Each structure stands twice: as structure tokens, then as C-alpha cells.
Amino acid sequence: MNTTAPQRRKSVAQILEAVVDLQRHIQPKQPAPFRGHRLSSSHLGLLFVLSHRSQCTPSDLATHLQITPGAVTQLVTRLRDAELVVSTRHPDDSRSVILTLTEAAQVHVAEFESSVLNKSLPLFNSLSDAELATLAALLHRAGERT
């Protein structure tokens, strides 16, 4: 039985509704074209993680994206075939690999991210810089894995 206070449940439901609504405005309606490839949001998410972390192991990606290692393998295989991701042997663990973006993918991810950001900026015009900082901090904190 759920013992969460009704008002807290209502507030969380309102937040989820707002996040879903916001996501509809931000997320492309169809798989996004990327260097001539149509990639899913899962592929794009993996590319963005790699662009911000520069390199990761498949297990790091699985943990960060909250998906199975098998799902990471499937995503990486498609991205490697598209020449967007390369894997090299891990220097400290020969059983693992390090995943990085290709140079061309780094440029394309930065351009794509900038384009999405530019299209999304007007959605936040009603918020002050301080409110944006607070919102970002709260969303990050709410999404932390415990």
C-alpha cells in the first residue's frame, strides 16, 4: 500500500505531466537525421553522453543510461557501423573497451545539440536566470540514482 501523502502524489503527478509536455516540444517528432542516418532517441542519448564524458566503458554507459549491457551493445554496434563511435581496448583492463566519438561525430553532435538548444530556448523565456539554475538543480537532484 502506498502511504505517500495525497498532496505529494498530486504534486509529483503535475511535475510528470509538465515534463512530458516539455519533452513533446523538445523531442523531434521522428527519429532525428544525423550524418545521413536516422537515429533513435536512445542512439542520440548515447552520443550525447559520450560527447560530454569524452570516453566511457559500455558498463559506464549502461549504468548512466539505465539500460542493460546488451542494449548498450546493440546501440554501439549501430553507431560503430555508422562510423560515429570507435572502441579501443581499455588500457587497464583487456576485457573491456573504451568508447569514444569519432572526430566527425563530435562535430555533428555539437551542431545537433546546439540546434536543439536554440529551438528550446524560447520555451524558457518566462524564467529568470536564477529560476533556470534552480530548475536545473532540482531536476538533476530528482533524477539522481539512489
Image: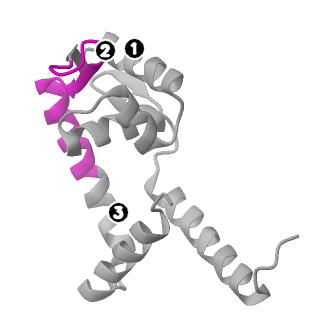
- Magenta region: which residues? 90-115
Residue at 51% x, 60% y is: 146
Q: Is residue 111 above or below residue 96?
A: below
Q: Confirm whether residue 98 shows in the render.
A: yes
Q: Residue furthest front?
A: 92
Residue 112 part of the magenta segment: yes
Amino acid, disc 3: Ser
Quarter of image, res 118: bottom left
- Determine contact: label 2, label 1, CB under 8 Å: yes
Q: Earlier in the sequence, mark 1 or mark 3?
A: 1
Helix, strand or loop at label 2? It is: helix
Residue at 24% x, 12% y is: 94
Q: Position of residue 73 (x, y in %)?
A: 44, 19
19, 21: nearer the viewer: 19
Which residue position holds label 3?
Answer: 120
Give me the C-alpha separation between circle 2 and circle 3.
29 Å
Q: Is residue 76 above or below residue 110?
A: above
Which residue position holds label 1?
Answer: 77
Quarter of image, res 58: top left
